[in-house]
Every structure is written in structure tokens, then in C-alpha cells.
Amino acid sequence: MFTFGIIDNGVLLLCLLVGLDLDQYIPIPRRYRSKAAGAAIGALVGNAISDGLAGLSQGIGPAIEVTVGCLAVLVLLPVVLRRAAKTQVQS
């Protein structure tokens, strides 16, 4: 299980770091783009990949289900970014 933890979190960390450099390429309004938004997308995608790989131990069906479930949360990201931008303006 130690190796699984290293691989699982290693994929997540790698995707988070890649996400930091994606902030200029994110298809969202410019005012919401930030390193944090890129890191969030990287972490969410990285989590979906690592959980999907872990799901393969249960079969292809469960792997697809968990991956789609993880990616479904990306739909909420614009709401979170808008709220964060409003909070930042008020500060």
C-alpha cells in the first residue's frame, strides 16, 4: 500500500504542478484566471487520473465510473472561481 500511496499522490502532485503553468490557457474568462485556478484544475484532473488507475484494480467499469465522478466536480469550478474573485475584490 505504501507504493500505491506514492504513485497516487505522485500523479496528483505532478498534475498540480503542470496546472500551475496552464493558467494562461484555461478556457475561462480572463478575470478568473490565476495560478490557483490552474493548480485546482491540475489537482482535480490528477485526482481523476490517479483514482481511475486505482479503480482498474476493480475492473474497467468501476475505473470509468470513478474517473467520470471525479471529473464531474470540474463543473463547479467556475462558481468557486467567481466567488473567490468577489472575495478578493472585497478585501
Image (cartoon, grey):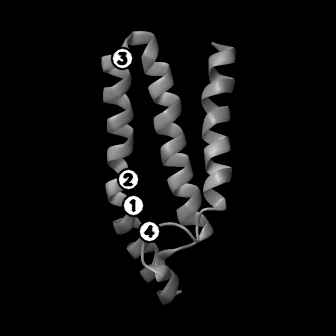
Quadrant of the snapshot with the N terminus = top right
Q: CA distance from mark 3 to mark 2?
A: 22 Å
Residue 60, given in percent of the width and then of the height, sits at: 36, 17
Q: CA distance from mark 4 to mark 3?
A: 30 Å
Q: Amino acid at mark 1?
A: Leu
Residue 2, given in percent of the width and then of the height, sits at: 68, 16
* Earlier-in-chain disc, 1 versus 4: 4
For mark 1, does the 10 Å Cα neighbourhood hold few (<14), some (14 to 19), or many (20 or more) residues?
some
Q: Amino acid at mark 3?
A: Ile
* Earlier-in-chain disc, 3 versus 2: 3
Q: Is 12 located above or below residue 50 in the figure?
A: below
Q: Amino acid at mark 4?
A: Pro
> Mark 4 = which residue?
27
Q: Secondary structure at mark 2?
A: helix
* Earlier-in-chain disc, 2 versus 4: 4
> Mark 2 = which residue?
74
On residue 7, the disc is: none
> Mark 3 = which residue?
60
Q: Going by the image, does 50 lie left or right of 27?
A: right
* Earlier-in-chain disc, 3 versus 1: 3
